[in-house]
Image (cartoon, grey):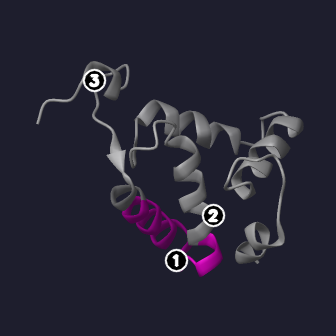
Amino acid sequence: KALQNEEMDSTGREPFGRAEFSKAMESFVVKEVGIRLLAYEIIFMERIFDRVDRRRNGSVIVGDFVLTLLMLSVHTDKLAKVAFAFDMFDTDGDGCLLYEQIMPMF
């Protein structure tokens, strides 16, 4: 299936979906840490994927995902990290956090 140009990243790579993302993250954690992800960690990873999926079509381009991972870096500005974390919890994008949005993470 041919993808439209706007669906590819700058290197011509096709976007990847939630299933590929989940499999890669699980594999990375098992390999690097030696444990499986806990339920709240899976929810957090899914929220990261949803945030990067700007077109809301169930796929992300590699460049957008890499930029998101850079936000988690120790070198990123603290205010930017707080804003990013807030967005992870604000699942409906209304600028307010509800108990129901926060508690599944804990």
Vertical position of residue 8 compared to residue 46: above or below = above
**Please, what secondary structure does the residue beneath circle 2 have?**
helix
Q: Residues within 10 Å of mark 3 (few under 14, many from 20)?
A: few
Residue 12's label in the rendered image is 3
Q: Earlier in the sequence, mark 2 or mark 1?
A: 1
For disc 2, the marked residue is 44
Q: Range of the magenta residues?
A: 22-41
Q: Residues within 10 Å of mark 2 (few under 14, many from 20)?
A: some
Q: Earlier in the sequence, mark 3 or mark 1?
A: 3
**Please, what secondary structure does the residue beneath circle 3 have?**
loop
Q: Residue at x 34, y 45 (%)?
A: 16
Toward which corner of the image does residue 3 lie, by quadrant? Answer: top left
Q: CA distance from mark 3 to mark 2?
A: 28 Å
Amino acid carrying label 2: it is: Phe
Quick check: is 27 in the magenta stretch? yes
Near-viewer residue (75 or 16):
16
Q: CA distance from mark 3 to mark 1?
A: 33 Å
Vertical position of residue 93 compared to residue 64: above or below = below
Vertical position of residue 30 compared to residue 9: above or below = below
For disc 1, the marked residue is 34
Amino acid carrying label 3: it is: Gly
Q: Position of residue 84 (x, y in %)?
A: 75, 44
Q: Position of residue 83 (x, y in %)?
A: 81, 41
Residue 49's label in the rendered image is none
